[in-house]
Every structure is written in C-alpha cells, then in structure tokens.
Image (cartoon, rainbow, N blue to C red):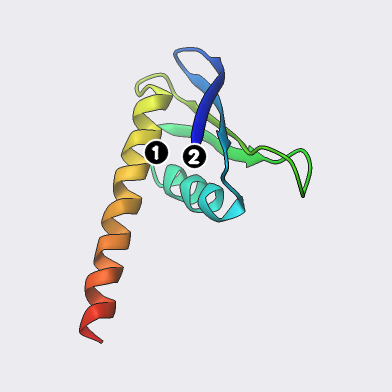
Amino acid sequence: MEAVVIEESPKKLIVELRGESHTLMNVLKHKLWENEKVKIATYHINHPLIGIPQLIVETDGSLKPRKAISDAAEKIKKDVDKFRTSFEKA
C-alpha cells in the first residue's frame, strides 16, 4: 500500500491509498465514524477496475484528520488481534 496525500488542511484530509480496495476502505470508514470528532468519513473509487481509492476525512477541528485515521487504524488492529485470539481458541 502507498498513501499519497491529495489535499490537507487542519480539518480535512484526502488521501489516496494505492493498492487497496473496498475491503480496507469500508472498515476504515466505519471505524472513523465511531469517533465523535469526525464529521465526514467516506471514500470513493473512480473506476471499478482500475480506480485508486481516495479516503476523505473531515473533523470538527479539535482533532487533526491524520490523528483520527491513526486512531482508527489502531482500533482496527486491536479488533483483529481480538478476533485472532478468539479464533485460535475455537
């Protein structure tokens, strides 16, 4: 995966996540929505076969978008670790 910042301001970040698909983008979007400081969390892929996903995150300004994404990624990691532990015990 390669992340390329397209647009950045104190409240908004648009970043391309090259090499990713709906799978990661949906999980990331939903985890971002759990943060009350995040006002917009969405993504789009311009072309279904060759498009590069763009993640769009806008916050209320009390949290930088980069931090919101980092926090969401950490929560996803914890969720995956919990799943792995549970699955290994099954």
Query: Is residue 58 left or right of 84 when viewed as pictured?
Result: right
Nearer the camera: disc 2 or disc 1: 2
Q: Check disc 2 and give the amino acid type.
A: Met
| Residue depicted at 51% across the width and 51% down the height | 24
- Where's residue 15, x and y in %? 55, 27
Identify the amino acid type marked 1: Glu
Q: Quadrant of the C terminus?
A: bottom left
Residue 5 falls left or right of residue 51:
left
Name the residue that disc number 1 marks: 36
Mark 2 or mark 1: whose residue is earlier in sequence:
2
Residue in the picture at 31% in, 49% down: 75
Any mark on residue 44, and which?
none
* Secondary element at image label 1: loop
Query: 58 and 26: which one is in front?
Result: 26
Q: Which x, y percent locates residue 73?
A: 36, 43
Q: Position of residue 13 (x, y in %)?
A: 52, 23
Task: Read off the residue under disc 2.
Answer: 1
